[in-house]
Image: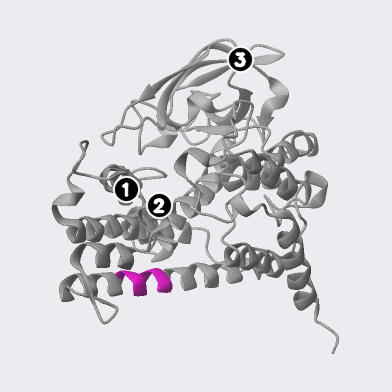
């Protein structure tokens, strides 16, 4: 019997993965082996570089992007098959990238052809690591009130100001940045969207230590930074339109942590962690209260995954509502926070360690990840902002 296109594609993908995905790339990714790409990338595991190069060569780090920009040119159905086959062999993500998750989709929609050809292939290949210049020290949730300014100096813009909570700015190569180019119009109308190299003279970063002890965020400073005018994306003073679209992509990205939040520290399932600490009987978690909470969480996880899939199908058909990203971001981050609360309840006093021989590495990591999860409802727009968007744009409630 002749195979259908999808069956043949699945067979081809399966065979390619069998031949090209290194065995060490079919394991849970240790935190220190996650690949973000860019000029500063250090490949602790040499297979990580091989895996990235092979996936990027096929455009499968950005499977649905057009081939002329380095993407895979796959249909959404083909992309789903690819993700299923990658999951089947437990393949590591070849590349983590704000360029793929946030900037790339915005460039596909708003950049000119020269900008697409310049930046998108490098994003696909992991050659450039991007960071986001949105929030400012005095303007958090009120993003449109930003004051970092870009003055027209003829052939270039002169940028002065600062950004905060810039994720991995100290490791990034380039930044996509919102700047004020006209202070004399309503705040949403005087914003522009610039791209520039973090190695530019006048750019500096200062890591911010979190309560978890890690420093993934930075404050970023711009002192007389010269940005060539051709690095303006979209129209001058119309950057807020791009910013809003990119925020939808960011919120979908952050929401994704809830769609797979049944996984806990080092990829272990929440139910397995619960069994380890409260015991099990006949294959079930021994504590009925913890068992009910884990089951409820797992049901919500599955329902959320199906909802995300349905929304994706509607978007492909030209329907859907972009503001649903706020709903997904809100629920996904709350789901992830609930996971850690259940985990800590099951672990009891073993969840309280910060250091010392009484706690193993996974227990110490869990404590820090629980603290880190509290920021989920702040980053990408606070939960309060998301609820306002849901009330106004999804439910149509009056101001």
From the viewer's perspective, tell me whether residue 114 is left or right of residue 90. Answer: right
- Report which residue position mark 3 lands on: 200
Measure the alpha-carbon separation of dots 1 and 2. 7 Å
Residue 329 image offset from top left, x and y in percent: 41, 55
Residue 338 image offset from top left, x and y in percent: 27, 59
* Count of numbered circles in the view: 3
- Report which residue position mark 2 lands on: 266
- The local secondary structure at tag 2 comes to helix
Tell me where the magenta segment starts and ends, as one range: 297-303
User: Tag 2: Cα neighbours inside 10 Å, few (<14), some, or many (≥20)?
Assistant: few
Residue 67 image offset from top left, x and y in percent: 81, 51
Q: Quadrant of the C terminus?
A: bottom left
Using the image as rendered, state which of residue 55 and residue 377 is in the foreground: 55
User: Tag 3: Cα neighbours inside 10 Å, few (<14), some, or many (≥20)?
Assistant: some
- Residue 139's label in the rendered image is none
- The local secondary structure at tag 3 comes to loop
């Amino acid at each position: 019997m002749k195979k259908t296109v999808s069956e043949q594609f699945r067979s081809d993908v399966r065979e390619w993965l069998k031949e090209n995905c290194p065995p060490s790339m079919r394991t849970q990714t240790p935190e220190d082996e996650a690949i973000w790409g860019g000029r500063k990338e250090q490949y602790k595991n040499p297979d990580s570089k091989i895996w990235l190069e092979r996936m990027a060569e096929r455009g499968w780090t950005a499977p649905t992007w057009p081939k002329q920009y380095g993407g895979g040119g796959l249909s959404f159905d083909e992309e789903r098959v690819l993700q299923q086959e990658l999951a089947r062999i437990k393949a590591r993500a070849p590349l983590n990238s704000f360029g793929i998750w946030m900037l790339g989709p915005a460039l596909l929609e708003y950049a000119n052809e020269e900008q697409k050809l310049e930046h998108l292939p490098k994003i696909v290949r992991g050659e450039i690591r991007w960071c986001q210049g949105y929030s400012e020290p005095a303007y958090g949730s009120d993003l449109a009130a930003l004051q970092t300014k870009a003055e027209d100096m003829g052939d270039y813009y002169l940028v002065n100001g600062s950004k905060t909570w810039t994720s991995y700015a100290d490791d990034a190569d380039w930044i996509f940045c919102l700047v004020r180019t006209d202070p004399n119009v309503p705040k949403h109308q005087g914003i522009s969207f610039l791209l520039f190299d973090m190695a530019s003279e006048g750019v500096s970063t200062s890591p911010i230590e979190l309560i978890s002890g890690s420093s993934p965020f930075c404050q970023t400073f711009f002192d007389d930074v010269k940005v060539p005018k051709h690095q303006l994306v979209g129209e001058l003073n119309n950057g807020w339109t791009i910013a809003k679209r990119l925020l939808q992509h960011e919120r979908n990205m952050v929401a994704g942590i809830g769609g797979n939040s049944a996984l806990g520290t080092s990829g272990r399932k929440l139910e397995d962690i619960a069994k380890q600490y409260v015991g099990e009987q006949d294959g079930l978690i021994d504590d009925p209260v913890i068992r009910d909470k884990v089951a409820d969480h797992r049901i919500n996880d599955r329902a959320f995954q199906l909802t995300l899939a349905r929304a994706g199908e509607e978007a492909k058909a030209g329907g859907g509502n972009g503001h649903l990203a706020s709903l997904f971001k809100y629920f996904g981050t709350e789901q992830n926070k609930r996971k850690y609360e259940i985990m800590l309840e099951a672990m009891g006093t073993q969840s309280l360690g910060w250091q010392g021989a009484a706690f193993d590495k996974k227990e110490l990591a869990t404590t820090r990840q629980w603290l880190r999860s509290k920021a989920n409802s702040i980053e990408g727009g606070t939960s309060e902002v998301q609820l306002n968007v849901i009330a106004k744009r999804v439910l149509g409630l009056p101001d």
